[in-house]
Amino acid sequence: MTTPWYEKHNQIETIVPGLQSVVFPGAPEGWVFPGDPGIPRTLAPTRYKNFGPRLGLAYSPKGDRGIWHWLFGSSGNSSIRAGYGLFYTAFEDATSFNEVGDAPYGYFYSSPQPTMFTTPFIDRGTGNPEGQRFPVPFPPLNTGPSHPDTSIDWSQFAPISSSPGFYYKNRVPYSEDYMLSFQRQLGSSTVLSLSYVGTQGHRLLADKESNPGNPDLCLSLASQGCGPFAEDGTYTVNGQTISSTRTVFQNGLGSNGIFVTEANSGYNALQVSLRHTSTRAAILAAYTYSKAMDNASSWGPGVNDAGEQLNPINPRLSRSLSAFDLTHNFVVSYSYTLPFDKLFSSNRLTKGWTVTGITRYATGFPVTINEQDDNSLLGTFCTGPTCSVIDTPNFAPGPLNFTDPRSRDANGNPKSYFNTSLFGVEGCPPPDLSCPNQQFGQLGNSNRRFFHGPGIANWDFGLLKDLPLTEAKKLEFRAEFFNIFNHANFGLPEGDIINSSFGFVTSARDPRIGQLAIKFLF
């Protein structure tokens, strides 16, 4: 059983289309709270029937002669293991702070139209005043179905946007984990391991737009100014007022994400490791060849500055490489006690010298391709801590032609990391990014993540010296160097096509860092 989090005074909210709050009768329809019909205090029901079976098998084969002896060795020299299990997890408590402080328990205002910095409540384009929004009196702690609050002026909050909800029927996420491994002892101090490891994640928590825009409606109102970022405007058609072009709520609710357990993931990997230990030396070499796929790599804030949000029309269209996918990952860690005590006289000066290090070569993380201009007219934008976008540009298949981030063109200007001419904004065929006949109201065909950025090559090194003081106390002197060869490991290129740096690498990981330390052990 897993009990989801809750707020001590029930001062959280969620979004349910068609449900009118009885806790706050004046709230916009769909904006509801614990205590409203069917809305639990936890905003997600407690489940008592989560069944998590696990199965494990282990077998130690013995090779008496020939190739079987070479493969398995003598009795106890090798083992074969297999396992499968269902594992449930709790919702992250961090999701609760996205619920706290929203209307009417707090105030997070996002103007329905762009404003000037000096006049935050006046629309920049039309001069229309949105009204002074502060201060707002907050309801008492005893608000509930038996003590409803009708005193709130909800016009001060509308349109409520950038205020996410947590779907009240969410179920606990779970994963299916499975593995098959073979271990072989090579001599008295070396072990080789070969493993196939996989995980399938189900009902994972992700962010999705609860109130997407209607592109066709917005396009029909283009003559009145409806377009990108204008889904929450007010328009008039044949004398009828349309308060927004959103499909679910037109009653004071704007763009609000909702956390739903609709995401899924898949991870499969070949893992190889070789471990050797001796009196003075220890070494572990490991290599992983893997692939991770999902349709949301995080439940809220974006990855690589791009955002993580399910496609509100068809979540399956969001599936791509995970933000943390690494195709190749090779790591060697080692330590060796220097034999100064053997070469010279054994004393406290010559004993206890040890060198350590970690070497890593890995594929870079995937580049998140996106288009933060709302050309789709779906209105999946916001200004809060869980903002994310689903808009992607168009992509014309072709060679990506990856280049060294250090490279320059004939004029000495940096080259883009990948072939940016293959991408064009929504409705525009590449490579024509100006696109005078640009069409709105559609998503681009590019996958959000389908190639990797620059790889990682890093060497960390350390020199340690133990100085015994007494039988139970000693000093340890440490000299440590991170990225000792000062190799440039570059960050990811910009993936937002409307950014002037699209395709260019503008950051790098840490340079060489050295530090000295003294540790007292007792």
Image: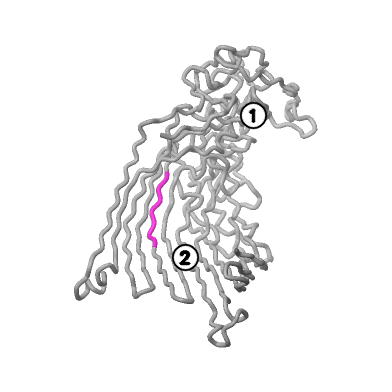
Q: Position of residue 7 (x, y in %)?
A: 57, 28
What residue is disc 1 on?
A: 101
Dot 2: element: strand
Dot 1: element: loop
Mark 1 or 2: the one toward you: 1
Give yes or no for residue 177 being in the magenta stretch.
Answer: no
Quarter of the figure that contains the C terminus? bottom right
Q: Position of residue 44 (x, y in %)?
A: 47, 28
Q: Nearer the viewer, residue 165 or 516?
A: 516
- Is the residue 234 above or below the residue 77 in the image? above
Quadrant in the rendering for residue 86: top left
Residue farthest to the bottom?
Answer: 344
Residue range of the region highlighted in magenta in the rendering: 265-271
Do we see residue 304 in this rendering? yes
Tell me if label 1 and label 2 are in contact, CB under 8 Å: no
Residue name at image x 53 percent, y 82 percent: 339
Q: Nearer the viewer, residue 39 or 518?
A: 518
287 lies left or right of 70: right
What residue is disc 2 on?
A: 330
- Is the residue 61 above or below the residue 347 in the image? above
> What is the distance, in whole Å, between disc 1 and disc 2 at their CAs?
45 Å
Do we see residue 463 in this rendering? no
Q: Residues within 10 Å of mark 2 (few under 14, many from 20)?
A: some
4 lies left or right of 137: left
Instruction: Decide whether the magenta segment is chiefly helix, strand or loop.
Output: strand
Quadrant in the rendering for residue 349: bottom right
> What amino acid is at disc 2?
Phe
Quarter of the figure that contains the N terminus? top left
Residue name at image x 27 percent, y 54 percent: 57
Indicate which disc, 1 or 2, sits on the residue closer to the N terminus. 1
Q: Residues within 10 Å of mark 1 (few under 14, many from 20)?
A: some
